[in-house]
Image (tube, rainbow, N blue to C red):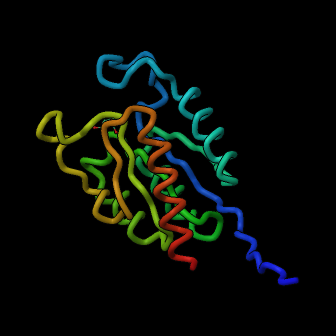
Amino acid sequence: MSRKKTRKRKRLSILVVHGPNLNLLGKREPQIYGKVSLDRINKLIRDESEKKNIRVTIKQSNHEGELVDLVGNARNQYDGILINPAAFTHTSVALRDALSACGIPAVEVHLSNIYGREEFRRQSLTAAVCVGQVSGFGEQSYLLGLNGLANAIQKAHL
Ligand code: DQA
């Protein structure tokens, strides 16, 4: 009888980072961001990651330096970063440099389609140093981004 060789996949560990003002989701401009709260989004992320056997740690900060520290210290603790840099997407060279230097893959997500909004939102300083970007699918952007990131990490480890 032939015994099938099964290689056990390491459980992935992903850091989820929410940028400024995302703590206000649900109350903040619902016509743009919907009525979904950050707690609800985090529950969706946790449920999806449980299904996929991914360990997630979720952080939110309104402070650029804190986000830079979170990304900069992620290297030895996580396999990848799922990030909604929010307004810092369009302004922060420091966050871009942190993502570029962190040594692990990141995926950028946005609830709204930033390319269909004001001119200043159509440029992302951070997307170019990420594996990819998901923009415009509301809370689903996070789940699509999570799955894309997990696939990219697994491919890189093959
Ligand atoms: C956002 C888009 C950004 O332009 C904005 O500053 C945000 C939220 C989004 O998820 O659609 O705060 O990142």
- Is 116 left, or right, of 143 in this rendering? left
Residue in the picture at 58% in, 34% down: 44
Residue 31 lies left or right of residue 18; in this view the side is left
Mark count: 0
Measured as percent of width and height from the top left, residue 86 is found at: 36, 40
- Ligand 1: give its quadrant: top left
Query: For this rendering, which residue is in front, 95 or 149?
Result: 149
Whether residue 156 is situated above or below residue 111 in the rendered picture = below
Front residue of this view, candidates 109 and 90? 109
Tell me the quarter of the image containing the N terminus.
bottom right
Residue closest to the eye, 156 or 23 = 156
Q: Nearer the viewer, residue 111 or 4?
A: 4
Residue at the image point whose x is 52% and y is 29% from the top? 38
Residue 61 against residue 4 in the figure, above or below: above
Q: Position of residue 10 (x, y in %)?
A: 71, 69
Q: Identify the residue at image location x=44%, y=52%.
A: 65
Q: Is residue 146 left or right of residue 53?
A: left
Task: Say which quadrant the C terminus sits in.
Answer: bottom right
Would you place residue 42 above or below residue 30 in this image?
below
Q: Is residue 114 left or right of residue 2?
A: left
Residue 106 x/y as whole percent: 45, 61
The image position of residue 46, as x and y in percent, is 64, 40
Instruction: Residue lying at the far bottom in this picture: please name it.
Output: 2
User: Residue visible at 70% across and 53% down?
Assistant: 53
Give the farthest residue toward the right: 1
**As drawn, which residue projects farthest toward the left?**
119
